[in-house]
Amino acid sequence: MTPIQQDVVQSSFAKVAPIAEQAAVIFYDELFARDPSLRQMFPQDMTEQRRKLMSMLATAVANLKTWDKIQAAVHALGARHVTYGVTASHYDTVGAALIATLAKGLGPDFDEQTKDAWIACYAAIRSEMLRA
């Protein structure tokens, strides 16, 4: 990611943070609509899962400029996901659901520059998780 992309992701996430719970609901609705088979990987009550998602995103976004601080944790998260049955193709679905969620949550603030920055951000996270 370029420094400009890092800034764009951080500033756009600051707009999502106040609606974190809603954003997480939108994300999982998008995810399960795109691949209903993924629903079985998650608990019936998604409250804690939604909180974990937004917490992980907040941590990743806050540390974009100091990636080395969280790289090992992102790698470990990827290793845990393997034990849940997550495959490489699932990451594509997650990425698409994330971009769709941001588009809905940010509305007109989700321009091409913001979209490209988030795609780059997710690619970095995805890449590290897949190394596990």
Image (cartoon, rainbow, N blue to C red):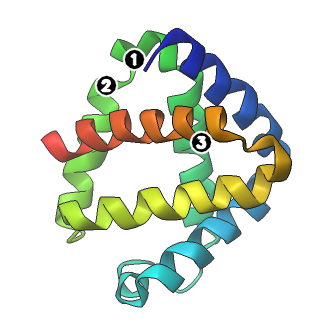
* Residue assigned mark 2: 71
Mark 1 and mark 2: Cα distance apart in space: 6 Å
Q: Amino acid at mark 1?
A: Trp
Q: Earlier in the sequence, mark 3 or mark 1?
A: 1
* Residue assigned mark 1: 67
Q: Position of residue 11 (x, y in %)?
A: 74, 26
Which disc is residue 7 wearing? none
Q: Residue at image x 25%, y 43%?
A: 129
How crowded pointer 2 is (Cα within 10 Å; few <14, some 14-19, many 20+) is rated as some
Quadrant where the C terminus is found in the figure: top left
How crowded pointer 3 is (Cα within 10 Å; few <14, some 14-19, many 20+) is rated as many
From this viewpoint, is residue 43 visible? Answer: no
How crowded pointer 1 is (Cα within 10 Å; few <14, some 14-19, many 20+) is rated as some
- Position of residue 30 relative to residue 56, above or below, is below
Mark 3 and mark 1: Cα distance apart in space: 20 Å
Q: Amino acid at mark 3?
A: Lys
* Residue assigned mark 3: 115
Residue 71 falls left or right of residue 106? left
Residue 77, image quadrant: top left
Residue 11 falls left or right of residue 79? right
- For numbered disc 3, what is the local secondary structure? helix
Q: Are marks 1 and 2 in contact (CB under 8 Å)?
A: yes
Q: Earlier in the sequence, mark 3 or mark 2?
A: 2
Q: Amino acid at mark 2?
A: Gln
Q: Residue at image x 53%, y 10%?
A: 3
Q: State the residue in front, 12 or 47.
A: 12
- For numbered disc 1, what is the local secondary structure? helix
Q: Position of residue 104 (x, y in %)?
A: 75, 61
